[in-house]
Image: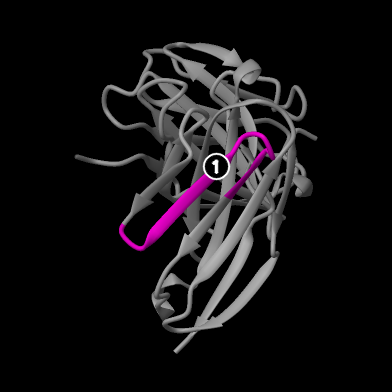
Amino acid sequence: SQQGEEDPQALSIQEGENATMNCSYKTSINNLQWYRQNSGRGLVHLILIRSNEREKHSGRLRVTLDTSKKSSSLLITASRAADTASYFCATVFYNQGGKLIFGQGTELSVKP
Amino acid sequence: GAGVSQTPSNKVTEKGKYVELRCDPISGHTALYWYRQSLGQGPEFLIYFQGTGAADDSGLPNDRFFAVRPEGSVSTLKIQRTERGDSAVYLCASSSTQWDTQYFGPGTRLTVL
């Protein structure tokens, strides 16, 4: 498989704490996208980071990309109960057109 | 503007029946993707359209699955002789180009009894 693993598989934290999720992959990418999913239905796009970028921010979200280690991290700062969801990273490989290859996801639980 | 829409939101059918799932992408998006997601798993790619043509159908599991996009906008995923193993949430996404953000619809939950 070209897609590696996300870790942790599950993460439980208190409101106000930071949450970090990691994603690894195996071959060169064009870009990497992070998504959030509630209740197993539609995926909400969070951030797209391209292979020539190292870090991107969006509100309380920070995504980093290390192409030498073939890994990415999603940091959610000052988490809220509403952040409880499954988080997926998905990669677009240069030789695979635009299709997204998803990891297994990280299930985040934020306790009030 | 309107996002990606999918109909029906839920579909229950019997083993052996034929089903059609519809996706209406964001207006102007030339790239359209179908994915399938089983419980507890990440979505798996099925097929990708660039305009009217299927640019990559390598994810279709077998020849019971077929998809069309005749006018380069709405797409229909067709499943013949459904099996219980086809039960999953079928997700559609669209993007302006193949290298840009993919926006997902709410999905169709297919249950094959």
- Report the label total: 1
Q: Where is residue B88 in the image (x, y as percent from the top left)?
A: 65, 50
* Residue B93 at x, y percent in the picture: 45, 35
| Left or right: A45 in relation to A41 | left
Magenta-drawn stretch contains A34: no
Above or below, comparing residue B91 to residue A19 in the picture: above
User: Looking at numbered disc 1 in the image, what kind of residue is underneath it?
Assistant: Leu
Q: Over which residues does the magenta segment extend?
A: A59-72
Is B24 positioned to the left or the right of A100 in the image?
left
The residue located at (33%, 23%) in the rendering is B29
- As drawn, the residue found furthest toward the left would be B1
Residue A107 spot, x, y in % from top left: 61, 67
Q: In which quarter of the image is the N terminus of chain B?
A: top left
Q: Quadrant of residue B2?
A: top left
Question: Which residue occupies 36% across, 51% down?
Answer: A57
Residue under numbered circle 1 = A65
Q: Is mark 1 on a helix, strand or loop?
A: strand
Q: Which residue is depicted at the point 46% across and 23% down? A: B99
